[in-house]
Every structure is written in C-alpha cells, then in structure tokens.
Image (cartoon, rainbow, N blue to C red):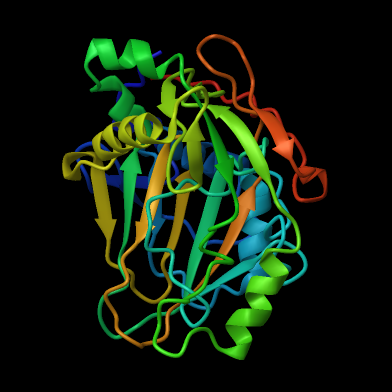
Amino acid sequence: MAVHAPEASEYEHVTVRQVGGNIGAEVGGVVVSGELAGEVVRELRLALLRHRVIFLRDQIGVDGDEQLAFARLLGTPTKPHPTVTGDGRAVLPIDSEEGKANSWHTDVTFVDRIPAISVLRAVTLPPYGGTTVWANTVRAYETLPAPLKALAERLRATHSNRYDYAGHRGEQRIGGVDVRERAHRAEFEQFEFVAEHPVVRVHPETHEPSFVLGHFVRGLVGFQTPDSTALFELLQRHIVRLENTVRWNWEPGDIAIWDNRATQHYAVADYDDQRRMMHRITLAGDIPVGIDGIPSVALVGDASQYSEVVAPPGVELTW
C-alpha cells in the first residue's frame, strides 16, 4: 500500500513541516513529557509513518526520565541493548569517546525482533559537525528497477552484532584501544547474536515493502562471498542515494524519532576529538516478515531478555 501525504487538516494538535522531498519532517507544538494527550501522540505517529523520521526542536531540560516517559507513549521500550548495559533500564548512551556510529545501519538488526522506533536525544553536542543522515528504505525499494525488485524480494541475509558500533571501538587509532574501550568491548562481546531476515520486509503498519540491510549484514543466504558482497553493495548503494536522504544539523534540545522499519541512518564523524553524547531509547517491534510470508529467524542468541515481540498498534491510516 503506497502512503500518500496527509492533508494539513489532519494535524489539529501539532504542526508538521517537511524538510526533505523523500524523508524527514520537523514537528512543532509538542513539549516532550509522559503527559501528552492521546490525540497528540496519534498525530505524532501519523507524521512518523509518513515522513519516516521526525524532529522535535527546543526540548531543553528534558532528562532521561522524561525521555523514557515520552517514549512509552509511542511503544514498549526495550532494554538499552542486547549486550550493553546502558543505564540499566532503557537508555543507551551513544558516546563518541567509546566509538562513532559512522556507518549506514538500521538499529539492532542482528536479533529476530528488530526495534520498531528509535528515540534519540542530544545531550552533548560538538561545536561543529556531528550531523546525522537518514535514508528512506521504503522509497529505495519503490524506485528499484523491476528486475532488481524481483530478485531482492527473494533474498535473505544474515545479520550479526560482531561489529556493532555500540561495541566495536577504535582499534585503528594509533596506540590501539584504551582501558575504557577495552572494557566496553568486552561487555559487548560477552554474547553473540545472529539473525536471518528477508532483504525486503513488509512494514507491519503501512504494508509497504522496505529493505532490511545495513552494516550488520554478514552475507546473503545461498551466495558465495564475492557474489554476496556485490549484490549487497548494489542494493545498499541504491538505498543511500543522496536524493533518498535527509541530513539533520543538531541543536541543543533536539530529539529525533525514526521508524526503524523504514530507515537506515549514519552519524557523520566530522567533529575531530570533540565530545558528542546522545541518549537512545528503542521501542519493541515485531518479527519481520518477507513479501513471501516467511518470517525472520534467530540463528544465534536469545533476544527475549532484550525485547518483547510487540505487534503494531491499531493505527488507522487516513491518507
């Protein structure tokens, strides 16, 4: 089902300003808290499903508790990460001193139950650089030539956490990794997760086909490594074409919310040795299902302690 832009009159409690032709919108009229009215939450979800990633400005003073209370209005929070403790509840600090997420990915695709939504809050920003870019994986599928669509719909890929940016740290720096990085890496590598997903899944709320790829992919099932790599690079290159992306310049108080089932993202590491700290909360999703009706499967690791499997809410799409 193709999703078309809703009429402005459908937004009665928030304002929505599109910031990219194919992805991204800034939403106004929202003060982040756990006390938002149901009508406001519904309109936020509508904007998110339509624009894939939405941005809330001027949320100065929002702390971790308020971020978590707000996130709970949109879904069921997962633990911070399948292997990294974070704050022990739901918040995963993304700290540039422990590594940088400068690689295209969808969050946590190495488990069978991929998170549905991510909520990212700016905590400490560098004086320059540090933008984040998102790509629309639904639009990427829609614009794929028909012969490649037919191929992609039949492909499955294995995903692994072995080089997750939350645990894979700067071995390439002169002098290797420091004590803090070694400890974090040891925590990350205490468990291994591998999942097999369809390369094209069906979005559970909009019913649109969407790519499931990114840097956690270890190979396409049934292909030798050279062919697997070539096919992956062909599809991944199509996903991240500049026309399919939006780039966000963070300001203090910004919160970004993205549909993890319809996007990839990349944190641009162009701020030298300046500090950049973000706090991420992910919301539980379902187990992806391919166009052929075959679901994802866990091959290594049990993610039940990380996340529930949550069916999407009964949002009525009115556009």
Which residue sits at x=54%, y=61%? 32
Instruction: Say which of 11 and 154 sits in front.
Output: 154
Q: Quadrant of residue 290?
A: top right
* 275 horizontally vs 287: left or right: left
| Quadrant of the rendering where the C terminus is positioned | top left
Instruction: Say which of 311 and 16 sits in front.
Output: 311
Which residue sits at x=44%, y=29%? 224
| Quadrant of the rendering where the N terminus is positioned | top left
Q: Is residue 194 above or below residue 157?
A: below
> How far across and down, in percent of the image, does residue 52 sit?
39, 39
Which residue sits at x=61%, y=41%? 38
> How far across and down, in percent of the image, does residue 238 sit?
25, 34
Q: Please say whether residue 71 is visible from this viewpoint.
A: yes
Q: Farthest residue toward the right?
A: 305
* 89 horizontally vs 254: left or right: right
Which residue sits at x=69%, y=47%? 193
* 135 horizontally vs 204: left or right: left
Instruction: Say which of 101 and 79 sits in front.
Output: 101
Q: Quadrant of residue 4?
A: top left
> How far across and down, in percent of the image, does residue 116 sit?
58, 39
Q: Quadrant of residue 204?
A: top right
